[in-house]
Image (cartoon, rainbow, N blue to C red):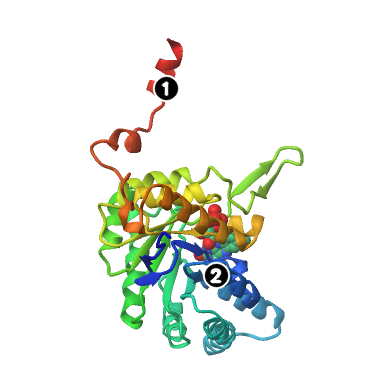
């Protein structure tokens, strides 16, 4: 039987299929189901820097008669952060006691400010690794790409200074020079990079002429964007890659491993099909490996990453050839 072991988050995982951070991984019962289904690791629902700030604002609005001075604000900030942190560290401890799968704490952050001090507590609570969901939408027309990128490098530096557990990052594709930035990020000391997190996207309802939220769950062909960049970058950077977004089938897991990913992270498919989808993906992967006479992931990982043979397919961006062929 094929051996599905792989390395990601600086850890050995028994399967390359990771339960990605979502509300599924905020619940102990779900965590047990995901572990039983064969997840290689479980990334807990993120503790959100933004969420903490919003709570603080709400509390302040409620107590209108108070004239908050700087000290009061500091105190309130401290209490609220402390409560969130307690809940989160409890979840880490409970998950560690309940399952025998690496538990990865996750922080969603948009600045390199004082939340950084929290991460030590997450490590102390027993998290095996930490994932930083770095989600900066570069929407400010006055900020340069250099200013935006600094957020990533500063955050990583600050976090690496305070924790000794492996730290990996999940990023979006919104960079003006994606390949170069990912290469530089891979040289910062992170244990892994995950391509690409999804933003909550706006859509437009033309009937009511309203801006609305688009589907929260991904679609099964959304994987093509991370697949291209996994193939282009996996052999050129200094840390392992994992992929997320649109991985809805066992076949897609295999595609990412062939493109050079060490693991994949799935969320939407778990909402659609339950934790058993992980068992199904593991079985499909093992069956395919047996058919191909591969005994371990490293026998084929990166076999179809970019190379002189594949450079044209990975880097071709225009459809010109397709249309010219169709005309004949
Ligand atoms: C309902 C929901 C909640 C999510 N919450 C988080 C989160 O707290 N932190 C995070 O890093 N990613 C979060 N994600 C993103 C997922 O971890 C994953 O990276 C993304 O959805 C792409 O994978 P998918 O196509 O399999 O859904 C969430 C996704 C969903 C659908």
Q: Nearer the viewer, residue 264 or 67?
A: 264
Q: Which residue is mark 1?
A: 322
- Label 2 element class: helix
Mark 2 residue CB less than 8 A from any atom of ligand 1: no
- State whether residue 270 appears in this view: yes
Q: Nearer the viewer, mark 1 or mark 2?
A: 1
- 68 up-or-down from 111: above or below: below
- State whether residue 141 appears in this view: no
Which quadrant, please, contains the C terminus? top left
Q: Nearer the viewer, residue 77 or 179?
A: 179
Q: Nearer the viewer, residue 262 or 182?
A: 262
Name the outermost residue toward the left.
308
- 328 up-or-down from 129: above or below: above
Q: Position of residue 22 (x, y in %)?
A: 58, 65
Q: Position of residue 261 (x, y in %)?
A: 37, 55
Name the outermost residue toward the right.
208
Q: Is residue 38 left or right of residue 8?
A: right
Q: Which residue is mark 2?
A: 50
Residue appearing at x 59%, y 73% in the figure: 31
């Amino acid at each position: 039987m094929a051996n599905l072991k792989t390395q990601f988050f600086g850890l050995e995982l028994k399967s390359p299929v990771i339960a990605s951070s979502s509300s599924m991984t905020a619940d102990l019962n779900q965590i047990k189901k995901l572990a039983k289904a064969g997840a290689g690791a479980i990334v807990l629902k993120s503790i959100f820097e933004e969420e903490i700030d919003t709570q603080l604002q709400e509390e302040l609005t409620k107590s209108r008669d108070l004239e908050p001075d700087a000290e009061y604000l500091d105190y309130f900030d401290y209490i609220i952060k402390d409560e969130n942190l307690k809940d989160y560290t409890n979840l880490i401890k409970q998950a560690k006691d309940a399952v025998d799968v690496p538990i990865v704490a996750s922080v969603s952050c948009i600045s390199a400010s004082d939340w950084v001090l929290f991460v030590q507590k997450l490590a102390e609570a027993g998290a095996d690794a930490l994932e930083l969901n770095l989600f900066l939408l570069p929407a400010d027309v006055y900020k340069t790409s250099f200013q935006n990128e600094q957020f990533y490098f500063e955050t990583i530096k600050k976090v690496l200074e305070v924790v000794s557990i492996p730290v990996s990052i999940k990023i979006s594709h919104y960079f003006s020079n994606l390949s170069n930035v990912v290469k530089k990020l891979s040289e910062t000391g992170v244990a892994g990079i995950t391509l690409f997190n999804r933003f909550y996207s706006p859509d437009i309802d033309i009937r009511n002429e309203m801006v609305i939220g688009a589907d929260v769950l991904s679609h099964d062909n959304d994987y093509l964007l991370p697949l291209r960049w996994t193939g282009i970058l996996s052999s050129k950077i200094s840390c392992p890659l994992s992929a997320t977004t649109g991985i809805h089938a066992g076949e897609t897991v295999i595609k990412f491993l062939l493109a050079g990913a060490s693991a994949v992270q799935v969320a939407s498919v778990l909402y659609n099909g339950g934790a058993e989808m992980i068992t199904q993906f593991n079985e499909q992967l093992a069956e395919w490996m047996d058919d191909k006479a591969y005994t371990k992931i490293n026998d084929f990982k990166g076999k179809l990453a970019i190379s002189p043979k594949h450079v044209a397919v990975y880097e071709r961006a225009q459809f010109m050839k397709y249309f010219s062929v169709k005309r004949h």
